[in-house]
């Protein structure tokens, strides 16, 4: 820089506003702080270095001492302990002291010396038969501390040596004691000898081993050798490792045992019972573990961990073998043995149920075996909902089999007998509600069964729960007492599975509903109605109230936090992570299913008013909401329609149909579809012309012109009435049993003819056509007089038929099957086989009910299966093709969710209307008059008097004459469109005019009535007109 001419230094100005003294002070403080930190770090570093050096020097000194003592040991006792005698094991000898001091399993010489020591130990004990004197000499009491110390060090060294060298000893880990020449067996048998419970130091040795986490070492040894055990022949023999475990697990601090309690994380339960398929490797250990004292101790220990939410399980062996699932499988497999003991306690069963519930809940659903077409038909597919969830990473198949096979009929029977053993299933006089033990038992059993239902295939457990246990009567007694004494809220806090604020009825209902529903699929009509088994009709009425209130609470008052109430399983597995939401969702399904089934029984033979199924909170607001799609009320209507009165559902159904008709009708300015139908070929013409229409055309209006037998078109313009007449005529022709597509039961109810193929080659196309015809009638609001059998209507709802539906088809077969069900002798003597004979139009064919059924005899053990297979064949299998095609045609116009709002009895009313005639007063109240008539006209008075005096048959003929249908609207004549009208015919009252018959225009629901002078004349003319059956020429 060039010289500027100014030799003075420029003054520096701090723009921050601080003086240079203040700045220097801050800098000084910061430097001091950094210096302090540096000195502290140096001190820490020096201290750490000193400790490391100290440790290193210590280790080096120890290693040096080990080497010195090792060298001295081998010089004194020989490389192979050839200079060792029995006196070397005594307290005054340095043999064991030196060996245990320098022993290192990584050192081959040390390992060989320990193995040789164990061989000598066993040899000396065999020679003298006394291990105590070998270690302690003549007086154990004077040197017990030193003896105990050396023995436990020796025992641990043996296990440590096997563990460290387990990969080299792989092929010898599970050998039996007769292979005594191998090093593994010598080491393990020495430990077995040292922990003999007869020895005074036994508990001290085992206690020391357990505190050194010996179970963890044994776990790793077992997992290492487990894969090759299947290659070894050890049937009926006990391996040394199994013998050692059998001795160790007996030390549980009971009786004379003084072993201290150890951390549950390192216990037998956590380390050994979590080994996959343990009992396959150690079958004898399974029997030892199942004895009362051991089983109770370990299960109680695990129950405490579950109660305290403590995670004590080791890391998973693999994704296929999670520790919790392995523990569950091993526990379940031994539970059957433990529960079969006569002295198995109630508390043990409670603890077991708590542990098993906790473990089962974490389990992914176990896949059900693929069901055949007939073999497992008794399982309702809705009940399999949770079990059919697809899991990406499932359990190992052998582990799945271990779990599912363990929860068998015998196990469930034993568990429920222990839990409910002290509870009477008969209604007691507990005015204060159920007692404490009963609450605990019900809570434990229901929690266990609830999670079991969601994990295992139901076919293997439902029947035994329903018929071999007291589950249903005990649970019903419990629920009834809680309901009558209003104890549900007080009960909530005692059911530990759910939060304290959860409704008390949730858990019992989650189990009771599916089991009782399964019972109802097997029970026959006489048992239900006459014998009142398993519940009395009075109790069933009470049950209906409980279920109805619970459902309304779950679905409307406090709705579950689920986006959709449908029975889809999409969100079920995610719901399982939240037990309360999951059980609410589950109960809403099973309670709805059970109420629906009870409603079916009530429809067969009424035992309670239909209104008992209706929820108390259904009002006009709810109905208006139910008409809006995706609203909660609409979802409830789909999920539990019986909660809503039938008339309200009919209104909703009518509004849905009207909305679709209006939407589709608005696109059709002119009627595109016109049928020309010959009356004497009505079915063939309708089949060809209706089948040609698309689904969109079917929704639109169809106009019909009839052609009589002379080829002349009948008079009249179709304003809707001719089409209604066409629908009644075509259904009458097609559903006539003489045509061969349908047969009728003894009660004259129609169902598809199983032999329809013999009659019509195109029978399936005709069934599709008839489904479309019926749907079109319902779509247009036309009632048709077709009485269908209930078991066929259930096919429109895609439901399964069971034994109790069989009387409506064939009462004789039903009686024969019930005779078999109650037969007291040996059924095998009746020479029945799993085959059934079909006889259609003289053609006999034999069909097997099961694979190779012709060689499978019916016995007392399988008679129930035979009975239901026969019922299934008659009610479901024989008509499956016809029903399927009928349903496809039906669903072209009528959506499934519309039909799901109604049961079979109500569906028949939608199709045909009420068979009880119609209310003349209702028709009179909703009638218009024209042409000079009015409500007080003398002719009108005569007309209503005559109509009231008609027989029911003539009243229905009159209704058909004026409206085209013999049955009135379901909701009354207020909903007849257009309203019924009486118009004066014949302007003057001349004799010629009064001789005319009444005429009608069914398209306008119009009666043209001349002004007859007398009641007798009016009655005569009206009866002649309605019975003439002359088509629309009369109009």
Image (cartoon, rainbow, N blue to C red):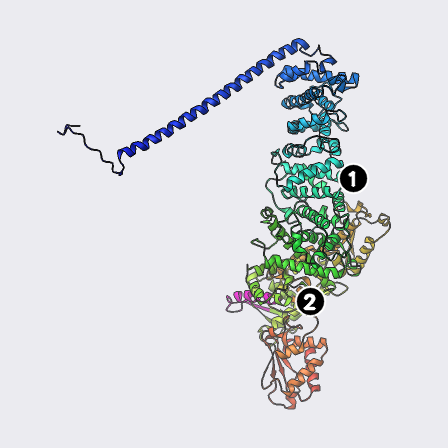
Quick check: is 530 in the magenta stretch? no
CA distance for labels 2 and 1: 62 Å
Give the magenta range: 650-675
- The answer to whether residue 877 is seen in the rendering is no
Q: Position of residue 246 (x, y in %)?
A: 73, 29
For residue 66, which numbered disc appears in the image? Answer: none
Residue nearest the viewer, comparing 385 with 162: 162
Q: Position of residue 332 (x, y in %)?
A: 71, 39
Q: Nearer the viewer, residue 117 or 757?
A: 117
Q: Residues within 10 Å of mark 1 (few under 14, many from 20)?
A: few
Q: Is residue 233 above or below residue 834?
A: above
For marks 2 and 1, give the one nearer the viewer: 1
Disc tally is 2
Mark sitting on residue 786: 2
Q: Measuring from the top left, give residue 479's x and y in whole percent.
A: 71, 55
Rendered location of residue 411, percent (x, y): 74, 43
SS label for mark 2? loop
Q: State the quadrant of the N terminus.
A: top left
Q: Secondary structure at mark 1?
A: loop
Quadrant assignment, res 307: top right
- Choose between 326 and 126: the one closer to the eye: 126
- The image quadrant of residue 220 is top right
Give the mark nearest the N terminus, 2 or 1: 1
**Rendering quarter of residue 322:** top right
Q: Is residue 510 above or below residue 706?
A: above
What is the magenta segment's predominant secondary structure?
Answer: helix
Which mark is on residue 341?
1
**Outermost residue toward the bottom?**
990
């Amino acid at each position: 820089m060039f010289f500027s001419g100014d030799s003075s230094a420029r003054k520096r100005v701090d723009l921050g506003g601080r003086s240079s003294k203040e700045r220097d002070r801050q800098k000084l403080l910061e430097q001091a702080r950094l210096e302090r930190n540096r000195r502290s770090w140096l001190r820490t570093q020096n201290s750490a270095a000193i400790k490391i050096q100290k440790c290193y020097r210590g280790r080096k000194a120890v290693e040096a001492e080990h080497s010195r003592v090792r060298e001295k040991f081998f010089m004194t006792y020989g490389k192979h302990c050839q200079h060792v005698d029995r006196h070397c094991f005594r307290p005054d000898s340095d043999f064991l002291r030196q060996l245990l001091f320098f022993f290192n399993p990584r050192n081959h010489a040390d390992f060989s010396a320990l193995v040789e020591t164990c061989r000598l130990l066993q040899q000396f004990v065999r020679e003298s038969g006394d291990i105590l004197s070998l270690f302690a000499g003549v007086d154990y009491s004077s040197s017990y501390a030193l003896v105990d110390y050396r023995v436990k060090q020796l025992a641990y060294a043996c296990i440590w040596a096997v563990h460290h060298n387990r990969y080299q000893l792989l092929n010898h880990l599970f050998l039996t004691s007769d292979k005594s020449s191998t090093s593994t067996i010598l080491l393990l048998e020495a430990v077995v000898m040292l922990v003999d419970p007869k020895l005074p130091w036994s508990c001290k040795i085992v206690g020391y081993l357990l505190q050194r986490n010996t179970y963890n070492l044994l776990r790793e040894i077992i997992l290492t050798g487990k894969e090759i055990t299947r290659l070894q022949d050890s049937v009926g023999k006990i391996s040394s490792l199994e013998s050692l475990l059998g001795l160790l697990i007996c030390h549980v601090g009971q009786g004379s045992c003084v072993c201290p309690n150890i951390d549950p994380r390192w216990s037998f339960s956590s380390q050994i019972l979590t080994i996959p398929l343990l009992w396959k490797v150690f079958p004898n250990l399974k029997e030892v573990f199942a004895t009362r004292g051991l089983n109770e101790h370990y299960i109680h220990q695990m129950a405490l961990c579950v109660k305290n939410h403590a995670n004590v399980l080791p890391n998973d062996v693999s994704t296929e073998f999670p520790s919790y699932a392995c523990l569950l499988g091993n526990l379940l497999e031994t539970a059957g043995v433990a529960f079969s003991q006569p002295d198995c306690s109630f508390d043990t069963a409670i603890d077991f149920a708590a542990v098993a519930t906790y473990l089962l809940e974490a389990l992914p659903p176990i896949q059900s075996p693929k069901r055949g077409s007939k073999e497992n038909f008794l399982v309702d597919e809705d009940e399999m909902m949770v079990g059919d969830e697809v899991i990406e990473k499932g359990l190992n198949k052998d582990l799945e089999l271990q779990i599912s096979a363990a929860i068998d009929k015998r196990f469930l029977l034993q568990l429920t007998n222990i839990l409910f053993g002290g509870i009477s299933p008969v209604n007691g006089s507990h005015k204060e509600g159920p007692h404490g033990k009963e609450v605990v038992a019900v809570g434990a059993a229901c929690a266990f069964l609830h999670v079991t239902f969601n994990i295992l295939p139901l076919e293997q457990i439902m029947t035994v729960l329903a018929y071999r246990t007291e589950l249903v009567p005990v649970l019903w007694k419990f629920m009834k007492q809680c309901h009558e004494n209003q104890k549900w809220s007080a009960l909530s806090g005692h059911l530990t599975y759910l939060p304290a604020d959860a409704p008390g009825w949730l858990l019992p209902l989650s189990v009771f509903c599916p089991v009782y529903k399964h019972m109802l699929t097997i029970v026959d009509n006489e048992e239900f109605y006459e014998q009142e088994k398993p519940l009395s009709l009075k109790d069933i009425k009470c049950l209906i109230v409980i279920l109805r209130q619970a459902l309304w609470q779950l679905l409307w008052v406090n709705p579950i936090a689920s986006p959709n109430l449908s029975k889809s399983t999409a969100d079920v597995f995610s719901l399982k992570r939240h037990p309360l939401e999951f059980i609410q969702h589950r109960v809403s399904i099973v309670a709805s299913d059970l109420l629906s089934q009870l409603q079916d029984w009530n429809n067969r033979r009424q035992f309670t008013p239909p209104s008992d199924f209706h929820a108390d909170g259904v009002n006009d607001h709810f109905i208006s909401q139910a008409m809006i799609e995706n609203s909660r009320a609409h979802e409830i209507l789909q999920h539990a329609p019986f909660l809503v009165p039938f008339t309200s559902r009919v209104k909703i159904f009518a509004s849905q149909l009207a909305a679709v008709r209006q939407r589709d009708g608005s696109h059709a300015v002119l009627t595109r579809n016109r049928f020309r139908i010959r009356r004497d070929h009505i079915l063939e013409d309708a089949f060809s012309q209706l089948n040609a229409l698309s689904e969109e055309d079917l929704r639109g209006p169809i106009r019909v012109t009839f052609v009589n037998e002379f080829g002349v078109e009948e008079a009249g313009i179709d304003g809707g009435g001719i089409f209604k007449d066409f629908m009644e005529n075509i259904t009458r022709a097609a559903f006539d049993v003489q045509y061969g597509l349908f047969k009728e039961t003894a009660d004259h109810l129609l169902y598809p003819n199983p032999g329809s193929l013999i009659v019509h080659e195109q029978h399936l196309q005709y069934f599709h056509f008839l489904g479309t015809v019926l749907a079109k009638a319902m779509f247009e609001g036309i009632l048709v007089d077709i009485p269908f059998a209930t078991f066929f209507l259930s096919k429109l709802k895609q439901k399964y038929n069971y034994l109790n539906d069989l009387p409506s088809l064939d009462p004789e077969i039903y009686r024969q099957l019930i005779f078999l069900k109650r037969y007291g002798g040996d059924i095998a003597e009746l020479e029945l086989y799993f085959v059934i004979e079909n006889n259609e139009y003289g053609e006999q064919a034999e069909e097997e009910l099961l694979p190779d059924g012709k060689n499978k005899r019916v016995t007392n053990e399988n008679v129930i299966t035979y009975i239901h297979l026969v019922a299934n064949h008659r009610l479901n299998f024989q008509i499956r093709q016809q029903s399927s095609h009928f349903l496809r045609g039906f669903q072209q116009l009528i959506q499934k969710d519309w039909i799901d709002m109604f049961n079979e009895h109500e569906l028949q009313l939608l199709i045909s209307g009420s068979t009880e005639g119609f209310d003349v007063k209702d028709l009179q109240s909703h009638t218009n008059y024209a042409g000079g008539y009015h409500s007080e006209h003398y002719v009108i008075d005569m007309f209503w008097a005559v109509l009231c005096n008609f027989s029911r048959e003539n009243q229905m003929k009159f209704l058909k004459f004026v409206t085209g249908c013999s049955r009135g609207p379901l909701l009354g004549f207020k909903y007849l469109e257009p309203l019924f009208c009486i118009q004066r015919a014949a302007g003057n009252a001349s004799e010629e005019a009064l001789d005319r018959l009444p005429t009608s225009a069914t398209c306008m629901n119009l009666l043209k009535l001349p002004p007859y002078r007398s009641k007798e004349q009016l009655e005569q003319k009206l009866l002649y007109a309605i019975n003439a059956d002359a088509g629309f020429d009369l109009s």
